[in-house]
Amino acid sequence: MTKKCKSCGSCGMSLEKQEDFALGDTAADYCHYCTDSAGKLFPFEKILKMNIAYYMESQGITETAASKMALEYLRSLPAWRSHA
């Protein structure tokens, strides 16, 4: 049986190695990109901007398209489901 890889509840990144987790804590729900130096989750707006930039760079799409895509995706994740 294959062990399922945990993913960040804020951005969806696969948490495969200890250093992927916030503060290197494998019990953390978020990755090191989505948290500050104390392990606290960044605000939604910061995570949204990071995701927009990622989509624009990795997929070569416009900021408008990346914004729509990032917003839809983030709202599907546990950290942001209730975010309007």
Image: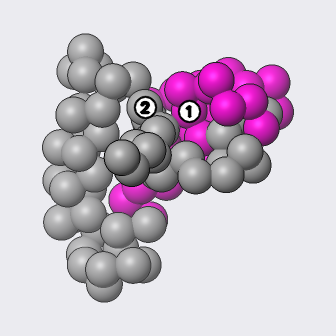
Instruction: Confirm whether residue 44 shows in the render.
Output: yes
Q: Which residues are drawn in magenta? A: 24-53
Horizontally, is 1 left or right of 8 in the view?
left
Q: Amino acid at mark 2?
A: Gly
Residue 30 circle label = 1
Q: Is residue 12 above or below residue 41?
A: below
Horizontally, is 22 left or right of 7 in the view?
right
Q: Amino acid at mark 1?
A: Tyr
- Percent x, y of residue 15: 55, 47
Q: Earlier in the sequence, mark 2 or mark 1?
A: 2
Mark 2 and mark 1 in contact? Answer it, CB < 8 Å: yes
Q: Is residue 33 magenta?
A: yes
Horizontally, is 21 left or right of 15 in the view?
right
Report the residue at 18% width, 66% height from top.
65
Which is more toward the observer, 72 or 19?
19
Crowd class of label 2 (few under 14; some 14 to 19; many from 20; radius 10 Å): some
